[in-house]
Amino acid sequence: MGPCDLQAVLSSLPRSSKAFARLLETNDDAAIVPLTHDLCLVQTVDFFTPIVDDPYWFGQIAAANALSDVYAMGARPLSAMNLVAWPVKLGQEPLVEILHGGLEKVEEAGAELAGGHSIDDAEPKYGLAVTGIAHPHEIVRNGGAQAGDRLVLTKRLGIGVLASALKKSVIAEDEMMVAIREAAALNAGASRAMLEVGVHACTDITGFGFLGHLTEMLQASATVDGPVSRRVGARIFLRSVPIDDRVLELVRAGVYAGGLRANRDYFGARVFGLPLDDPLALALFDPQTSGGLLLAVAPSRHAALLSALERESAGAWTVAEVTADPGVHIELADEAAP
C-alpha cells in the first residue's frame, strides 16, 4: 500500500494505546513492549508477493526483510512465524523452496521458527511475524537525528527497479544476482555495529524508498521545547549514494513500479535541489525490499561507525548530513564536499 493510502487509513483509527500512538506519530520500524526494567519485546510483521522468480531466493529475501525491522531497533530476533498465501494449483515444490530459504535466514539470525499460518490464495505471498528482545537502553528509534549528524547507508539502492525489469522480461534474473544476494543479507552486522558505536537514530530502507524513510526519520527527529519547535532536514551527497548497476538506465526507459511514483507524489514536496522526474531523483524514491539500515551518527563517532561496519562486513556509504534547515536538499556532490 502506498504511503498516502496507508496514512489515511492509520490516521482514521483510534489511538487505543501509547505504543500505537507513538507508531502513528514516528513511524518506528517495530513495536516496543516493555516486560521488565531490563527487558522488552520488539515485534514486527512483513510479507509480500515475489520480486524474483527463484522461490528459494524469494524466501531468503522475504525473511531477511521481516527480520530487518528488529535489527533496525537494535534488538535481537528471538522467534519467527511463517505467513504463507499460496495458490494450491502451483504445487508444493516451489513453496517448499520458499520455506527452506526463509528457514535458513531465521536460523542464521539465531532465532527459532515457531510454525505459522497458511491460506490458499490466488497470488503467492510470504513473510514472517518476528519477535525480538532488547534491553530498553539498547533500543534505537528512527527519531533522534541531530543537526550535524552524518547519515550512513549500509546497502545499495535499486532492487525495486530491477525487480520491475525482471517482471517485464527486460532483464534476466542472473543479471540482478548481486542485488538479490545483497537483499538476502541480514542487517545483523550493521545492527551490532551501531550498538557498539552508538548512533542517534536508525531506520531500514524498504517500501517508501530512501527519500521516504529519510523524510520519516527527519519528521520523527523534530523536537519541541516549550513554545519552540525545532525541525531538522538533510543535505544529500548525491554522488555518494550507492545505486545498483543498470538502475538509472532502466529508470530512463520508464521501467519502474507504481510504488515509486506513489512515493514521489507523497514525499516529493519535501525534496529540493533536483527535478523530481530526474532519473537520479526517481531512483531515490524506488521502493526497496530488504534494504539496508540508514544510521544517523554524531560526527565524532562517524569514523568509528565506518570501522565497525567494515569489521562486520556491512556496507558503509556516507550519503548525507543532517541540517538545521527543514527539508531534504539534494546536491550533486560527494561525501567529501564541504
Image (tube, helix red, strand yellow):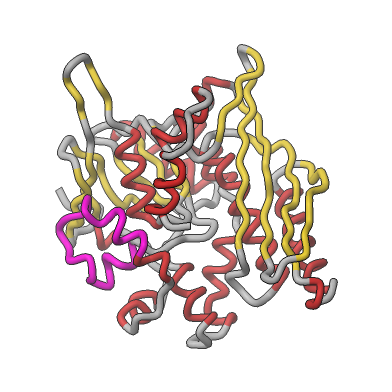
Residue depicted at x 43% and y 72%: 257
Residue depicted at x 53% and y 76%: 176
Q: Which residues are magenta?
A: 262-284
Which image quadrant is residue 246 in?
Answer: bottom left
Image location (x, y in percent) of residue 86: 75, 66
Residue depicted at x 22% and y 41%: 233
Q: Is residue 104 left or right of residue 164?
A: right
Q: Is residue 218 magenta?
A: no
Residue at the extreme top: 37
Report the number of numbered marks: 0
Q: Is residue 233 left or right of residue 136?
A: left
Q: Is residue 185 left or right of residue 299?
A: right
Image location (x, y in percent) of residue 2: 43, 57
Query: 3 above or below 299?
Result: below
Q: Main secondary structure of the magenta part?
A: helix
Residue depicted at x 61% and y 12%: 37
Q: Observer-nearest residue: 249 or 227?
A: 227
Q: Is residue 263 magenta?
A: yes
Query: 249 above or below 133?
Result: below
Image location (x, y in percent) of residue 160: 47, 68
Which image quadrant is residue 89 in?
Answer: bottom right
Query: 195 above or below 55?
Result: above
Image location (x, y in percent) of residue 85: 72, 62
